[in-house]
Image: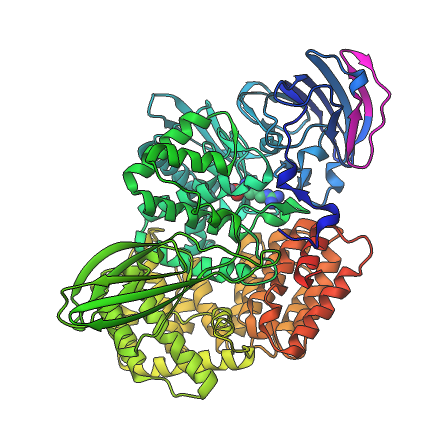
Amino acid sequence: MTAHIAPTAILLSDYTPFSHLIDHVTLHFTLHPLQTRVSARLSLRPNPAAVQGQDLRLDGENLSLLSLALNGKPLAHAPDETGLTIPAADLPNGPFTLETEVEISPQTNTSLDGLYMSNGMYCTQCEAQGFRKITFYPDRPDVMARFDVTMDTDLPTQLSNGNPTGPGAWHDPWPKPAYLFALVAGDLVAHTDHFTTLSGRRVTLNIYTRAGDAHKCAYAMDSLIRSMRWDEQVYGREYDLDIFNIVAVDDFNMGAMENKGLNIFNSKLVLATPDTATDDDYARIEAVIAHEYFHNWTGNRITCRDWFQLCLKEGLTVYRDQQFSGDMRSAPVKRIEDVLALRARQFREDGGPLAHAVRPDSYVEINNFYTATIYEKGAEVIGMLKTLVGDAAYADALNLYFTRHDGHAATIEDWLQVFTDATGHDLTQFKHWYTQAGTPHLTLTDDFKNGTYTLYIKQNNPTTPGQPHKDPKVIPIALGLLSTSGAEVLPTTILTLTQAEHSFEFPNLTAKPIPSALRGFSAPVVLHQTQSNTDRAILLAHDTDAFNKCEAGRALAKSALTDHILHQTPTPHDWLAAITAVTRETTLDPAFRALTLRLPSDDDIAQTLHASGHIPDPAAIHAARRTLQTDLANHLKPHLPSLIAAHQTPGDFSPSAIAAGHRAFRLGLLSLMARIDTAPATHAYQNAKSMTEQLGALAILLDNGMGQPELAQFHAQWQNDRLVMDKWFGLQISMAAPDHAAHITKFLTEHADFDWKNPNRFRAVIASLAANHAGFHHASGQGYALLADWLIKLDPVNPQTAARMSTAFETWPRYDQTRQTLIRNELSRIRQTPNLSRNLGEMLDRMLGA
Ligand code: ARG
Ligand code: ZN
């Protein structure tokens, strides 16, 4: 990928199979906060597929080795900084056992990687390379073994992978790589249910939490049961153990982890009650519970050969969880939300210094590659594959994948071969999607002559770091044509691009049609087309494709915003009239109307301006957005009170997508109303029946410079609920006026409850500053300096979270010289910190283009 990180880079091209196979692993843990002992017994034999006569190299970090024996005979080899080598001369040619005993200190492990403690509970996170902090082991995904685990502790709940064989004793019958190992010990309570699989296996389902949280697991459990049924019905995949355990942990770097039979979750993705969790929280819980469960097949039964293949499990599993959520909720609304998130996170990444291929071929620190590109673009690539081969062929290919590779550590080549074998498609060119970074830009032009409509499409693949040359990609374009009266004259048709330029002809038309291109967002590309506002309004009113219908509204809003920013053009009546019509159209799903009402974010506008060759001014973007909102509010004013009243959700709380859609739409309307009068939002806050309404109303008040009494009331009400307090911290910063954002952030970092070592709390404060576009990019540079200070402070404690948060700076090339210099100076200042982690060091080098 890049030459500049060569010194310590790991290369895909260097892959070789491991010297040995491990048939069995026995682990015993004597748990102690500062002196945990781990005894490991590995049954090894030479790997017939590897070069014979190699040394045995085991990974190990921060382990004190107490004893080492081979076939029962003590060895004296000493480990180095990163592991332990047993020279070939000391190894038998056939099977042997290796026993080690090490001591580790979970209490002082603040990295939350390996074995660590969270509120008195022991837990683990081993993906990608945490197992090497637990014992000496070949910590790579292609070494798969059966594990037996026992533990000694006074804590009552003692969990590991597989099926229980006695108190604190577990046997996992499925061979697995070390990254799927997990152990939990704590004083926990279980929320229990059962699921009977397709073939009649009765599986016990447990969600473990701290005692006070036991009543918050019902929705996660319901989501799990629906996921298990869906994977049987849609992919024919059945669960394969007697028990499935989930544990909620307060201190967790990521969302969740798919350890075999023992998923470990960030508590914010498990715990929900109507008064503490928002509708977005409910939707994310459902999606992530499904995601981790689906990994049991796409990830665990079939894993990755090496970490370059990460998208093999993550792209596919995201694709599956998106399908699931679409089936559980509204598929069109889910698709619109997924695309907005893809553009906000992945296009942003793909267009900057951190761009990398869906399958990279080089990395320094693998934990830096759990990105929107690997996950979300990885999922889009699978969606395109399905569009290209068709639904039935996709199902055949997946069945072949599961039968051919079950129990294997596979590659992207294996995955594509399955599609070729099952469907006959040659995917040589399609593979560029995996190996070449960057978002393709498509330019559409057209003409109409003698009854024939011609569409010209050009593709351009911008260069990315380390990849100056790109080949044209295979791009499926879902196209429909509408007449100027809004009738569909061509239903959705797939055009497949393979070259840099194409033209497509549509004969026998009576008038020039309006193209509806890239329906359903059929490929992750940026589309450039000259559309009149009249055509956009026709598409918004009449397109049969929900995605493009919504997209037409966004295109209207975006051109209104950019025209206002660049040319001070007043808010166009076309847009006001078109949005008003959709807002009042009662046959449309309220969730859809809520999405149409939402203006593009400041960061989205900055991205759009940059893509069209302008330098975004954060303050001007912010001001333009507010002006348009106010104009829309005034235009909609006569209708707002009745619409707000009509979307009050009656009766008991339901987390359903329909009820959530009403709440989202009503909050969107209240937010517009607050541009004229904040009293309805105050009233909504006081009468809120759910966290969605309480937090939503508070956000509206803060956005309009009000809400101080409500903020105090909220604190008094929720000060003992960690997850709700994260929202209290975050909202004040994300809603802060640009001039105050850095100051409020600094003030909150001095709050007694700012526990910066907790990743959720750190993100609530620091990531909210980064998300406040005009505040973070304030001309003073205070936002940049504050983020840099906190990255320097967090890095020695938790390098993974520090590195992840540093991506707030990835958009620096978009901005003016002054801001670029301010950011680059902060990046260099962080880079000069002594003993910087490999995680943060790699991110800074890539962002600085070193
Ligand atoms: N495999 C997990 C998931 O997507 C994520 C683990 C990320 N861990 C990390 N250290 N980067 O479901
Ligand atoms: Zn995953």
Q: Quadrant of the C terminus?
A: bottom right
Reply above or below: 495 against 778: above
Q: Position of residue 628 (x, y in %)?
A: 40, 81
In the rendered structure, the answer to whether residue 641 lies left or right of residue 162 reads: left
Q: Position of residue 27 (x, y in %)?
A: 67, 22
Image quadrant where residue 55 sits? top right
Quarter holding ligand 1: top right
Reply above or below: 684 against 138: below
Q: Choose between 228 and 505: the one closer to the eye.
A: 505
Instruction: Specify start and end residues of the magenta stretch as a single range.
Output: 66-87
Q: Is residue 636 visible?
A: no
Q: Position of residue 525 (x, y in %)?
A: 42, 60
In the rendered structure, the answer to whether residue 646 lies left or right of residue 438 reads: left
Please give the name of the residue rendered at 40% of the width and 75% of the height, measured from the top-left corner: 558
Image quadrant where residue 479 sits? bottom left
Reply above or below: 661 against 556: above
